[in-house]
Amino acid sequence: MLLFFILLATLLVELIAVVAGYYKLKGYTFVYHIFNLIEYVLFCLYYLKVCQTDRFKKLVKILIPVYIMFCLCISVFHYHFDGLPAINIDAEGFLLFIIYTHLLFSLEVNEHRLIFAHPDFWISTGILIFFGGVFVSFGVYPALLNINPTKAMGMFEKTTEPLNLILYICIIISFICLLKTKRYSIQ
Amino acid sequence: MLTKNQEIFNTIELASIFFILLITIIIVTAILYYNRRRIHKVDISNFQSMLLQSRLEVQEQTLTNISREIHDNITQVLSFVKLNLAMAGSVNESEKQFKIDESRELVAQTINDLRNLSKSLSVEHIAHLGLVKTIEIEVDRINNSGLLQIELIIEGDNYSLGEQRELVLFRIFQETLNNTLKHANARHLKISLQYSKQLFTLSLEDDGKGFSPHELSNELGSGLKNMQNRAALIGAVANINSSPGRGCRIKIILNPLEQDKYADGNYPNSLG
């Protein structure tokens, strides 16, 4: 269910971005400020649901409100809900990178199932590739925009488009694996 | 200025590539780690199913032995006692007393046999008595039956190898004994248990007709293969040597110092 919500939220945001880009609308970037929070919370809830080890869970639970407060402060006082929230996305990426690396190394082992049939493997892989890949470019994006906006935009698109695609493919594979697992497991 | 800007962009691209490489390493490591844990889990699962199978086979063999013992020994003795007592009514006083005394002795012997038999009713006695004592009981039973003459030699101070490993070793012993009785046409069986700090050895040597390892029937061949697999799962090595007319020698070698990996939490000492 959580995966479905993640996919739905992502689809909605991408749709807004496409429509806004097509009609050359401005000011739609505030959506990213909201989506960023929703995405982080949903990924954390997914982690809390599937992770078998309790050691890390408490920290993740504490980090949810801390991250929300941090992002709201940055969005209100630094970005004024305008422009791409690069700091928020980098902070999200940094936290999710650590959380999902932990999940990747603590996957529940099933002797009859290869790692590639594990939904959590795909979701972790997608998150690691996406947030690890955009970490550098998002971090320096505002500075690059001041140096060379055309080149900055070009590089940004060159990086984010394939990484976005990988993330969504991984989420979809994970979704399929989850459905298959549910079908063949004893309810 | 343009070159400097280009350098900044190039550095960022390089940094991104470095991050992607790092992620690839993390993912590959995670895959290898998962596979290692999965193989380990499969090993544990195999070990436990083999253990359960051994337990069931020991139980089955024990019940077969008990059934044979009741049929061949106890029923015969009690029939003789019944006949003795029936005849006692029609004989003179001194003969009557003799038959009653004889019957009393036979009943006492039967009670003793039943007591010994009850000791082998449960697989749990391996855990309570240990491998040596359990083998001794089995040897006594066979020696008393006269089916085979078994010589048991125990060298060194015996120590526990753990309930699960002793169960598997006992099952190997039981299987060998069964094969000797069924197929070998042997008169003597020499069983030797050697306990030293570095090595535990269980060897079983019969003077039967022997066999050529290449000409084994499927049943016996898979039985011996199974024996070797069982030994491997407890970290032991099973050597089987035989040739036609020269008997058979089975040697199970176990290094107690290498038992740590089998004795830790991965190979627990109880099934529960």
Image (cartoon, rainbow, N blue to C red):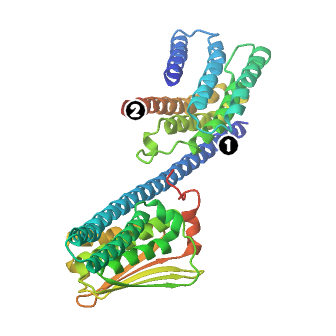
The answer to whether marks 2 and 1 sit on the same chain is no
Taking depth in this image into account, of B68 and B162 the one nearest to the observer is B68
Point out residue A161 in the picture as x, y percentages from the top left corner: 52, 29
State left or right for residue B71 relative to residue B232: left
Point out residue A133 in the picture as x, y percentages from the top left corner: 60, 37
User: From this viewpoint, is residue B215 visible?
Assistant: yes
Report, in whole angstroms, how far the alpha carbon at label 2 lies from the one at label 1. 52 Å
Q: Determine the image quadrant of residue B95.
A: bottom left
Taking depth in this image into account, of A28 and B62 the one nearest to the observer is B62
Point out residue B247 in the picture as x, y percentages from the top left corner: 29, 87
Residue at the spot x=25%, y=81% of the render? Answer: B184
**Amino acid at pointer 1:** Thr
Residue at the spot x=61%, y=41% of the render? Answer: A101
Q: Determine the image quadrant of residue B183.
A: bottom left
**Disc number for residue B11:** 1
- Please tell me whether mark 2 sits on a helix, a strand or a loop: loop
Residue at the spot x=53%, y=33% of the render? Answer: A163
Q: Quadrant of the N terminus of chain B?
A: top right
- Please tell me whether mark 1 sits on a helix, a strand or a loop: helix
- Report the chain holding disc 2: A
Taking depth in this image into account, of A110 and B206 the one nearest to the observer is B206
State left or right for residue A174 relative to residue B109: right
**Residue wearing tag 2:** A186
